Amino acid sequence: MEQVHISEHPLVRHKVTLLADERTDAKTFRELVRELTRLLLYEATATLPVREVTYRTPMEETTGYQIGARIGLVPILRAGLGMVEAAVDALPSAEVWHLGMYRDEATHRPVSYYNKLPAACPDDVVLVLDPMLATGGSATGAVTVLKEWGAKQITFVGIIGAPEGIEQLQTAHPDVPIFLARSDRELNDDRFILPGLGDAGDRLFGTSIPEMTS
């Protein structure tokens, strides 16, 4: 699976452990999501094209480099919102578009409820942001929408993935690189990642306290 990249960076491994710990409060959880997003983006954007530019330092004129692609950020609502701030800090000229999807609790299938994409894709590279890659349904659906929109180069950036979700996204869209902080063991009967971290949206926004089991 050449398109799947699981970070081996010590800081990423350390911070994702803190993130998943049930004792981590909502404020710290949000901070860790931002920190992990920033670290993962360094890896996910390593192959972005650059162009040479001329500029002046306080000493003399010289040459340097600028990103040579127009970049779009697409957080999958709602949990993906927790990754946007760090992504915009790293890529301040990027455009942010939104897709809203939720998981039907009966069928476990993704349901699209919000789409604010413009008529045509203006970006050269689109980064899909979602902390969890569980069943892969939402990510696969989002990438399908983005391809129909006209996106030519798409990368998925998440934090924790399950083998089932990774396989689903790779099977449906083998051209889309996947960058994750960690790949966990499996999904349970309710389609939550094990050991996972519970519900990322709830923990980001403090809407409920996930029920943890040993």
Image (spheres, rainbow, N blue to C red):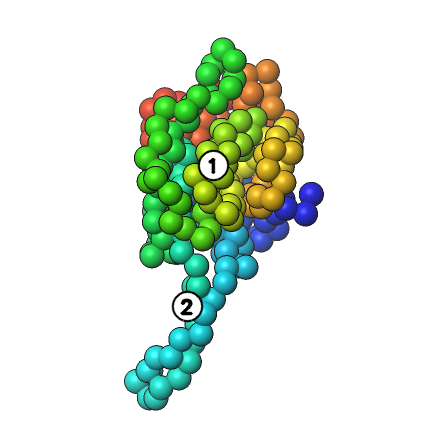
Lateral position of residue 132 relative to residue 88, left or right: right
The disc placed on residue 148 is 1
Give whichever of discs 2 and 1 has the lower sequence position: 2
Element carrying mark 1: helix
Q: Nearer the viewer, mark 2 or mark 1?
A: 1
Q: Quadrant of residue 186?
A: top right
Residue drawn at 52 percent across, 13 percent down: 107
Residue drawn at 61 percent across, 51 percent down: 8
Amino acid residing under circle 1:
Glu
| 27 in relation to 124, above or below | above
Report the residue that reaches farthest toward the top.
Answer: 106
- Looking at the picture, how far across and down is residue 125, in whole percent? 46, 51
Residue drawn at 45 percent across, 70 percent down: 51
- Looking at the picture, how far across and down is residue 162, in whole percent? 60, 31
- Looking at the picture, how far across and down is residue 213, in whole percent? 54, 20
The disc placed on residue 87 is none
Amino acid residing under circle 2:
Gln
Looking at the rendering, in which quadrant would you find the N terminus?
Answer: top right
Q: Which residue is mark 2?
A: 66
User: Taking the image as drawn, is residue 26 in sight?
Assistant: no
Residue drawn at 60 percent across, 24 percent down: 187
Instruction: Give the camera-side residue of 203 and 148.
Output: 148
Instruction: Give the camera-side residue of 12 and 141.
Output: 141
